[in-house]
Image (tube, rainbow, N blue to C red):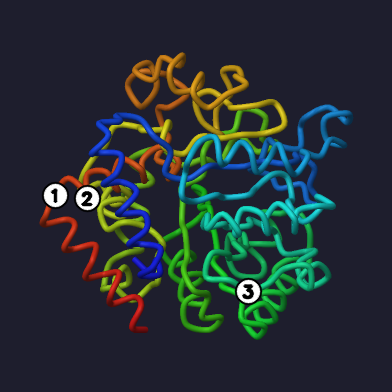
Amino acid sequence: MAMPLRQSIKVATYLAEQKLRRRDKFPLIVELEPLFACNLKCEGCGKIQHPAGVLKQRMPVAQAVGAVLESGAPMVSIAGGEPLMHPQIDEIVRQLVAKKKYVFLCTNAMLLRKKMDKFTPSPYFAFAVHIDGLRERHDESVAKEGVFDEAVEAIKEAKRRGFRVTTNSTFFNTDTPQTIIEVLNFLNDDLKVDEMMISPAYAYEKAPDQEHFLGVEQTRELFKKAFAGGNRRKWRLNHSPLFLDFLEGKVDFPCTAWAIPNYSLFGWQRPCYLMSDGYVPTYRELIEKTDWDKYGRGKDPRCANCMAHCGYEPTAVLATMGSLKESLRAMRETVSGNRE
């Protein structure tokens, strides 16, 4: 796990505080969507299927920042849509960083070089660039040629300017262990991004492509083979060791979607950013008035093939904190990652 040591300590301290306060549900990271509009039409995403009037909306800065502060989460992932299309995205980031929130701005990087001057490097801020494969595979997944090359150049420029750069890669049933190995080797060894996040694709109800989402057993077999030969240890993956064990099928966990809540133009989304069972205006109402026990594999049929990080990474993190052995294991990997 390549999470910076300072961030690891802050998150560990935050989790310890929740335990002392005997809180059984709390946010680890907020998925903030200040807009749904995007400049790409990815086959596996259902976000741009909203009506034209909704796609024109932009969340006010005070509303975006206020939602994060209301939740109390130490980390924020700003997604969408394409966040760099928001005219005040730099101000949203600036205010969250000023509050010492760890901010990850998710982007397809098409506008990154053009907008980079609006941002300032900070240990509390990182660009999270979406990369689903090498050139041909990535461009196919986003339905546009040239996107991979632009993303690579934007990553190089951001690194040159001193920004932290992470990546997010989603894998489908058209992937093989080799395609995963190739893209993660490229990101880790050639581009030298700071850390990488990986996830099996979730079947968005409104996604144009409904044929290529992974099942649970497919996911386990795929990652078991991709992680073989010591790959897990050499890649700077932004995941707890237990979540990687989960992807391989070595352990299983219940879903804790409440730990990565989603806040969008419509409010706090039930139960997670992948599924929509309505919205509520406050974080407290989301936590207290959602029947969390009815979600997860074996409970809701929509969850049957989900192994996404938004539901299961928090469970892995909490399991890590509850075990001295796993805490020491995660600490060793964090220190090792920061030495590279």
Dot label at residue 323: 1
Relative height, residue 195 to residue 308 (above, below): below
Residue 284 in the image: above or below residue 233: above
Q: CA distance from mark 3 to mark 2?
A: 30 Å
Please tell me whether residue 243 is drawn above or below residue 9 in the rendered image: above
Q: Amino acid at mark 3?
A: Pro
For label 3, the crowd category at 10 Å Cα-Cα, with few meaning under 14, some 14 to 19 and many 20 or more, is: some
Dot 1 falls on a residue whose secondary structure is loop
The residue sitting at 78% across, 40% down in the picture is 60
Q: Quadrant of residue 241?
A: bottom left
In this picture, residue 251 sits left or right of residue 158: left
Q: Which residue is mark 2?
A: 320
Quote the CA–CA distance across marks 1 and 3: 35 Å
Which residue appears at 31% of the width and 46% of the height? 15
- Discs 2, 1 touching: Cβ within 8 Å: yes
Q: Amino acid at mark 2?
A: Thr
Query: Foreground: 194 or 296?
Result: 194
Give the x, y percent position of residue 245. Answer: 25, 53
> Tag on residue 121?
3
Q: Judge from the rendering whether residue 143 lies leftward or rightward of residue 299; answer left or right.
A: right
The residue that appears at 77% across and 56% down in the rendered structure is 84
Tag 2 secondary structure: helix
Query: Where, quadrant-wise, is the N terminus in this rendering?
Result: bottom left
Q: Position of residue 118 (x, y in %)?
A: 78, 67
